[in-house]
Image (cartoon, rainbow, N blue to C red):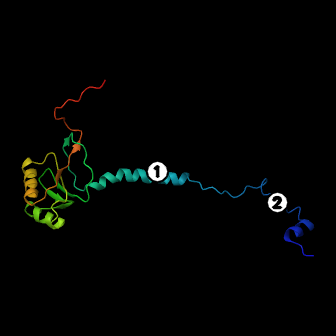
Amino acid sequence: MALSANDAFAAGGGAKRRRRYGRGRRGALSEINVTPLVDVMLVLLIVFMISAPLLTAGVPVELPKTEAGAMQDQPEPITLSIRADGGIYVGEDPVPFATLAPRLQAMTEGDTKRPIYVRADGRATYEVVAQVMASLSTSGFTTINLITDTGGPSSGIEEPAGP
């Protein structure tokens, strides 16, 4: 007659060695502690929320404020910035005014319907902004947008008072 492992322990004094798994010892913890994971994810979320606005525009300009609302996003616009000192930038690269139109046409490969966002500093002279806009228009670009900040002075239209 063959004995199993359990019978061998029970027959030869194994009662003293028998363990009670449920009562005396703690079993293995089968749950994952997610508190450190949540802490790390919240820190990453805050870091990305703070750094995301800094990545949108590379040339610092102070945009004028208007009451117009924000536009809906269009695919891959070209950003053209005009600084207060009259410097013109395509993206983050400085461009002389004389080579602005040929450079934009080379970038768009003749697609004059591609939107161009003009970000002019509020202290830039009207002359420079008008010359850039005229150069874009005569080059055939039809979708030219001026970028401003919201919350500026009103156009004088009074909104009706609430009840």
Dot 1 surroundings within 10 Å: few (below 14), some, or many (20 or more)?
few
In what quadrant of the picture does the C terminus appear?
top left
Question: Residue 159 appears at what percent x and percent y?
Answer: 23, 30
Question: Residue 133 appears at what percent x and percent y?
Answer: 10, 53
At label 1, the amino acid type is Leu
Q: Earlier in the sequence, mark 2 or mark 1?
A: 2
- Quarter holding residue 161: top left
Residue beneath disc 2: 19
Image check: 16 left or right of 78?
Answer: right
Q: Residue at x 15, y 52 (%)?
A: 83
Dot 2 surroundings within 10 Å: few (below 14), some, or many (20 or more)?
few
Residue beneath disc 1: 42
- Quarter holding residue 96: bottom left
In what quadrant of the picture does the N terminus appear?
bottom right
Image check: 70 left or right of 85?
Answer: right
Question: Residue 136 appears at what percent x and percent y?
Answer: 11, 57
Relative depth, front residue between 131 and 60 = 131
Relative depth, front residue between 39 and 103 = 103
**Element type where label 2 sits in the image:** loop
